[in-house]
Amino acid sequence: MTLFVCPNCGFKDYPCWRNHRHQLYTSYCHISELETFDPKLAGEIRARAPTERLPYQEGPYVYVLKPSGYVWRVTLESYQNGAFNRALTESDRYRHRLKLAKAQTRFPSNNRSLSRSVGK
């Protein structure tokens, strides 16, 4: 197991963290992976998740356990600048897109591409 160590402060980072493709400055990993590498941190995050769903701050990072079982983390500076607020509402945006897609399949006249093909 290779640890990533900061040369300035000595902070050790585990290789289970991956960069999020759609959220800048956000890393993620599954809670089961985190339990393997850092059981203490995973326990602290799990203890808050079911009741509070509040971000957990430890070291230079802020963590949130998503309903999908993935833990998202951002730096404390990014969290204070509001970067994590967008991350917390990602599931709401996804649900809104699903509702729009269902509405377009139920009522095809609202979909412009279908209404153009019907008019010809």
Image: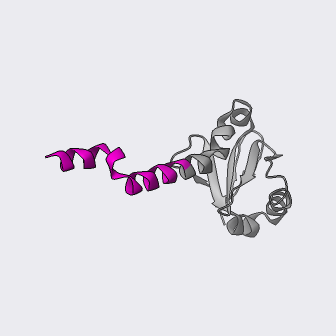
Instruction: Report the quarter where the N terminus lies.
Output: bottom right
Q: Is residue 62 magenta?
A: no
On the image, which quarter does residue 28 sit in?
A: bottom right
Span colored in magenta? 96-120
Q: In this picture, is 44 found above or below 110?
A: below
Q: Residue drawn at (86%, 60%), measured in percent from left and top? A: 47
Is 82 or 26 nearer to us in this picture? 82
Q: Is residue 15 visible from the viewing direction of this image?
A: no
Q: Is residue 71 visible from the viewing direction of this image?
A: yes
Is 54 or 115 nearer to us in this picture? 115
Q: Residue drawn at (79%, 52%), measured in percent from left and top? A: 53
Q: Is residue 94 left or right of residue 4?
A: left
Residue 43, image x and y in percent? 84, 63
Q: Is residue 118 magenta?
A: yes
Q: Point out the residue furthest to the left here.
A: 120
Q: Residue drawn at (68%, 34%), measured in percent from left and top? A: 78
Q: In this picture, is 120 found above or below 50?
A: above
Residue 94, image x and y in percent? 54, 51
Q: Residue drawn at (72%, 33%), measured in percent from left and top? A: 77
Q: How is the image coloured?
A: one colour
Is 63 or 86 nearer to us in this picture? 86
Q: Which secondary structure class fits the magenta region best? A: helix
Residue 14, image x and y in percent? 69, 58
Q: Is residue 106 left or right of residue 16?
A: left
Please state the total of marks drawn on the protein image.
0
On the image, which quarter does residue 31 sit in?
A: bottom right
